[in-house]
Image (cartoon, rainbow, N blue to C red):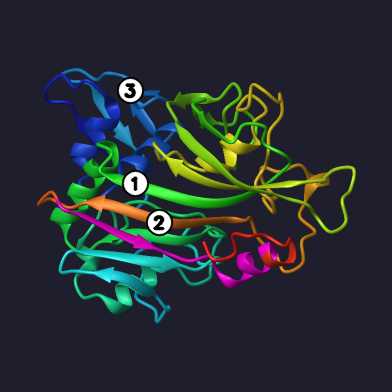
Amino acid sequence: MQTFVVEKDQERLDRFLADSFKNVSRSRIQKDIEAGKVMVNGETVLEGKVAVRVNDKVEYNYTAEEAISGKDVEIKVIYESADILIIDKPAGLVVHPAPGYKGPTLAEGLLYKYKDINLVGEDEIRPGIVHRLDKDTSGVMLVAKTQKMFEYLKDAFLERKVKKQYIALVTGHIPSPHGFISNPIGKHPTDFRKMTAIEPIDPKASSTEYTVLEYLQPQTPTRVVDEYTLVRVNLHTGRTHQIRVHFSSKNSFEDSGKGFPIVGDNLYGPKAAKSSLPGLHRQFLHASQIEVQLPDGTWIEAHSPLPEDLKTVLENLNSKNTNL
């Protein structure tokens, strides 16, 4: 337990702790607050937006995350300069260590390959990592090689100087060929693993744009799955599980009254609609393209073609879009 006495009025508790713990990420601080690890004047506080005042006593039951070491994890680099990387993450690779997970991570691979990247970022277990992809989502990711670029990229995501595009296969027939989903996303009220757009806790504005590329018929239609929709997705915000949540939510598509979960998504898709497509052992979601505006004003762009497992799925469905 670490104890502080506030020396000047602060707008928010989480910002006070972020200033006091320079090497701890704001997301980690927020999670610790919500987990009841912070007290103000002897009372547990569960919201980071609570204001603290001069002479308030703040107690933080902070447990340092275990430092990680480098491991020889294969990293496919698409673009590299002195201060930035764009990599092509394979499905199945976890971005950074998490409680209970013992397998290889991208973070360990970065530490093994790049000298001094352990000095970049907000904490020891996420060296240079500005954003993340879920374990079973493949595709392009940005990594900062210097602290200056790390800070720049954090702001760039907020200022729309990063553009991300995905390819997804969803269950069902999306009626509109193009649309925007703008339902706020927050924590699920009963399942800690999930986010939700239906009565979320602490909702945040979220915007997903989609364009239908193709409608595809399964070789053996069933009562549950009689059609798939292949879509291109552009993210205008970057919430946790945003694409998976927005497409699975029944309030996202007003003209249909139901959701269209990502094929193979066992967390957000209904159990009855689990994918039986040959060769698909994960959600059909791929980060295909990323563009970023650099500090000098120029834009760089990187593209990742569909991995073989997803390409094979489309070939088996007689898709015309196997070369995305």
For label 2, the residue is 289
What residue is shown at x 69% (from left), y 51% (from top)?
263
The magenta segment is: 298-314
How many angstroms separate mark 2 from mark 3 (CA)? 35 Å
Give the mark nearest the N terminus, 2 or 1. Answer: 1
Is 35 part of what is drawn in magenta? no
Q: Which of pointers 1 and 3 indicates the residue nearer the eye? A: 1
User: Residue 126, can we see it?
Assistant: no
Q: Which mark is residue 49?
A: 3
Q: Is residue 141 left or right of residue 116?
A: right
Instruction: Give the image location of residue 92, x and y in percent.
Output: 56, 66
Give the mark nearest the N terminus, 2 or 3. Answer: 3
Mark 2 surroundings within 10 Å by alpha-carbon count, few (fewer than 14), some (14 through 19), many (20 or more): many
Q: Is residue 100 left or right of residue 296?
A: right
Whether residues under marks 2 and 1 lie with C-beta atoms below 8 angstroms apart, the answer is: yes
- Report the amino acid beneath label 3: Lys
Q: Which of pointers 2 and 3 indicates the residue nearer the eye? A: 2
Whether residues under marks 2 and 3 lie with C-beta atoms below 8 angstroms apart, the answer is: no
How many angstroms separate mark 1 from mark 3 (CA)? 29 Å
What residue is shown at x 19% (from left), y 39% (from top)?
20
Instruction: Give the image location of residue 309, x and y in percent.
Output: 63, 69
Q: For the residue labelled by badge 3, is the local secondary structure a helix, a strand or a loop?
A: loop
